[in-house]
Amino acid sequence: MSRYAPVGGRLFTGPFILFSILALIGIVFIIERFIFGLGAVTNLNNGYPWGLWVVVDIVIGTAFACGGFALALAIYVANKGEYHPLMRPALLGSLLGYALGGGAAFVDMGRYWNFYQVFNPSVINLSSVMLEVALCVFAYIVVLAIEFSPTVLERFGARNAKRALGRVLFVFIALGILLPTMHQSSLGSLLVSLGHKVDPLWQAYEMLPLLFLLSAITMGFSIVVFEGSLSSLRFRTTGERPLLEKLGPIIVGMLVAYLVVRFGQLLLSGSLGRAFAGDTRSLAFWIENLLYLVPVVVLASAGMRRKPQALFLAAISMLLAASVYRINAFLVGFNPPPGYQYFPSVTELLVTVGMISIEVVIFLYVIKRFPVLHRAEQAA
Amino acid sequence: MVEVNHKAAIEEQLETISTQLGISRRGFMKFCTGVAATMGLSSTAGVQMARAAANPKRPPVIWLSGQECTGCTESLLRSQHPTLENLLLDLISLDYGETLSVPAGHDAEANKQRSMKENAGKYLLVVEGSIPTKDDGVYCTVAQKTILEHVIEAAEHAAAIVSIGSCASWGGIPSSGPNPTGAKGAPQVLEGKTVVTIPGCPPNPYNFLATVLHFVAFGKLPELDTKGRPKFAYGRLIHENCERRAHFNAGRFALEFGDEGHRRGWCLYKLGCKGPETFANCPAVLFGDVGNASWPVGTGHGCFGCTEQGVGFTKPIYALSDVQNLHPPVSFPDVTETKGEGMTAGAGALLAGLAGAAVGAGAMAAKNLGQTDSDSNG
Amino acid sequence: MKRRDFLKAAGGGAVVAAAGGGSAQARPNREPLPEAVGMLYDSTLCVGCKACMDKCKQVNDMPMEFTTKDKLWDAPRDIGAKTLNVIKVYKNGTAAVKDRETDGYAFVKDHCKHCVDAGCVSVCPVSAMLKHPETGVVTNDPDRCIGCRYCVYACPYNVPKYELDDARGQIRKCQFCNQAGVERLDRGLLPGCVEVCPTGASLFGPRDKLVEEARRRLALKPGEPYAYPRGHVEDAHHTHEKPAPAYVQHVYGEKDGGGTQVLYIAGVPHQRLGLPNLPEWSYASRSEGLQQTLYGGMIAPGVVLAGLLWAAHRRSKHDDES
């Protein structure tokens, strides 16, 4: 018998304090950005209008937060109920990831005071991919908050409210799968309108939504494995390991599907030759795809899947692969106006580090004080 | 000692010249300094020129005239002070010159031959007017010889050759289509020889004077461009020093003669001013010493490119000029120049540090996972 | 309904979506508006006087942009938040002869091309980028703009620029001198840059007339005299005669990237001038086509949601039971 329970214990541990400090440093520079403008903190220029914040904090950050989405797919669509114990930490990770992605979008948004226009039916542009992403992400944050709310209600003992919510929760669960499907694929569609400004190695046009969706789902599963491994290490919750092992074949399936689409598209569009150009971009391309290949090889054998170490490394490789894919598609493979260059500034990097630190700090706080992790009865 | 005596002789000569010219010694020095300034030389060069001009050993000059209107000589006669023509006649020994020399007919021709023989390798040859070359040059003959023969003969032993005016420099008006006489400039008929060209119709007398005085004073010619033009005078476009240039830059153009822009003195480019493709120092030294209303743009009409082959007498007066001074165009942003910030050392280090920390943490976690694995197995 | 049936249904939905994706041109290129205005830039006529840059700053009330050490000159290196129009140069080798590809140079004027099927208009989430329904001029409304800079990112010509150095910055781009407060076109004036152009390198007029003019010029033999109009393409009074140069036989912007209202002809290949080689199928139409296929009438998401609701409902009942 097992149940969800707070981890408890001391709040101000070493990692907690370290991440708090990093978070504070980031916040200082976020304040600077709001006072002096984006140019004061970032290295953004008008050739590279989107930089580290958009690509890492939003495009990659929300993909990192796809654990909830991926598990929901497994539990409700593939009918794998046994993954339920992983659901709460995954949902928490998703909620935090998306909330911070939304926060980062706000920080990066030049004219944030006009943000309400996104909800103004008289001005919205329905053919804009950006609008779809913005609305979907916003809606998904709300959905995630509702999906996660039983945990909070449980903590404060609001049983009636929890039961009432339970009756309609399935609506939010369904939305919680539909919305990320839409906007994670649309993160890829964002690049369609860039046309030649994205290198043919990454400009897959109509295949972009599928590639981004597949990479988001694989990333979601990987983050579940990653978080599960780490928390089993930190909080000795060994009960989840068999479940993590079982995710292996699903991940391999996703990866193979992804690679088939990825290379098939390149082959059909005749752009695969670019991969052998021997320049920085072709190198980036191979790093990205070799990182995709590592988990396929590692997780293909059942013996390896049983080793938590191998599982953990495969998850990391996968997370890196999808991250590199997104960085490549949005920045490395981006053809700026002639002559422009970009590399994030120190302060820009510190803000991103700060953003991630905020996420970690909140995550640590919540799992210690709320019933998120699934623990064996005797361990609690 | 000899030098001191020589100097004293020159000083004396300076006095004599100023008395002869009816101008003060000071005025004469001022003139020479002014000439030096035209060339962008220092005032000591002016003193040097004054000394050279006062030297009793005046350089002999043979002045040949081909197909010309004598406008070059006329403009030279009207340079600066009323007595300048006297100075010129005293500065140089004009041993032959159809307009200005004293002898005429056979005497003139005999004097020319004598001077060329006596001063072989020392005299200055000035060519005015274009040289017809068609039908063996029969379209212009002097003393039963074609001017073509005259020029080639005189050029043989000349110390330096100067073409004055556009006709002598590149053919000028006579060479414009259809060019019935096959008119050419001196550099074209004297290929292989250095010919200084002072184009212009008429040329600015100071450009000629400055070149000649430079030769007399320093024994060598001023720096020339590929077309034989002294760089001090023809190194820049009229456009570059034009008094109306600011209007060009701001896009303020006169569109018709007498319109508001014209009355306000705006740029005449749209009315066909050739300043942007004509190399000359007109806007800097002006013309005729009567203020800036004496050069074309100052009068309200565009430059017509008299100094420039292929522009003056060739392009329609009101056709737009091709702006020449913009290449190599360093002042323009290149289509592909670098913009934005690349990787700074700090950002690179920070990123590397973060990557290192992440790798370290990952490795630690993996190691611990391995341990728990063996723990549970064991 | 069994799980198998659901999967079948869901698969059916996917097929619907895929079938839509198969028809490549779900949303064809937009056509040029009948009343569209435009500009013809003839690189061979441009003398690089930069009068257009000066006038542009004046008309649009833009600040100086100092890039030299002495901070004395307005010397923008590219269009940007302070500069809407820049004359740039292509140089090769000795840069001796104008409008020659090798060892030559050529000028190019960079500003908004006012695309027929504008990418910025297509991507803007809040319709801050708008294409005028008659003139086709693309304008920007800062009161709507949320500052996401997607237009900066997506514009094939890299035209919209954001004021990154200002905490209350906005998008800046050429609006054909017809934005609120300037309205030169509405007042019957020429755009600033065209008005001052001494050679007619920038020529204003209806887009179709400009295309005709460009074709006429390309048909000229090199050296053949031609009366070049200045200001307005139909202004026969302010022409100047000039022998025709050797034109590259392409009217850039007639079809490129779905067409633009600012057209380019030149003596060197257009790609040398920084004008990208674009397919005729506009990126905007390709992107919108994809979006409409996936989300048209929200049919596909609706089908998927129905399936998901069923699955989640069924599964969460199990949760209660367990």
Image: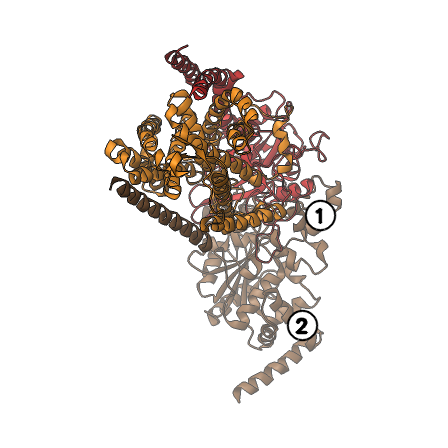
Chain colours: A orange, B brown, C red
Q: Where on the picture, by quarter, is residue A235?
A: top left
Binning the other alpha carbons within 10 Å of mark 1 as few (below 14), some (14 to 19) or many (20 upward) gives some
Residue A125 image point, x, y percent: 58, 25
Label 1: chain letter: B
Residue C235 image point, x, y percent: 66, 29
Label 2: chain letter: B
Q: Residue furthest top?
A: C1
Q: Looking at the picture, which amino acid does disc 1 mark?
A: Gly
Marked residue nearer the N-terminal end (2 or 1)? 2
Q: Where on the picture, by quarter, is residue B7?
A: bottom right
The structure residue drawn at horizontal position 59% and vertical position 77%, both measured from the top left corner, is B51
**Left or right position of A341 against B71:** left
Task: Determine whether the residue tagged by mark 1 lies in a helix, strand or loop.
Answer: loop
Question: Quadrant where the C terminus of chain C lies?
Answer: top left
Res. B310 mark: none
Binning the other alpha carbons within 10 Å of mark 2 as few (below 14), some (14 to 19) or many (20 upward) gives some
**What is the count of numbered marks?**
2
Residue C172 image point, x, y percent: 61, 39
The residue labelled by disc 1 is B300
Residue in the foreground of this view, choosing between B270 and A119:
A119
Image position of A238 with respect to B103: above or below = above
The structure residue drawn at horizontal position 43% and vertical position 55%, both measured from the top left corner, is B191
Dots 2 and 1 on the same chain: yes
**Left or right position of C215 against B349:** right
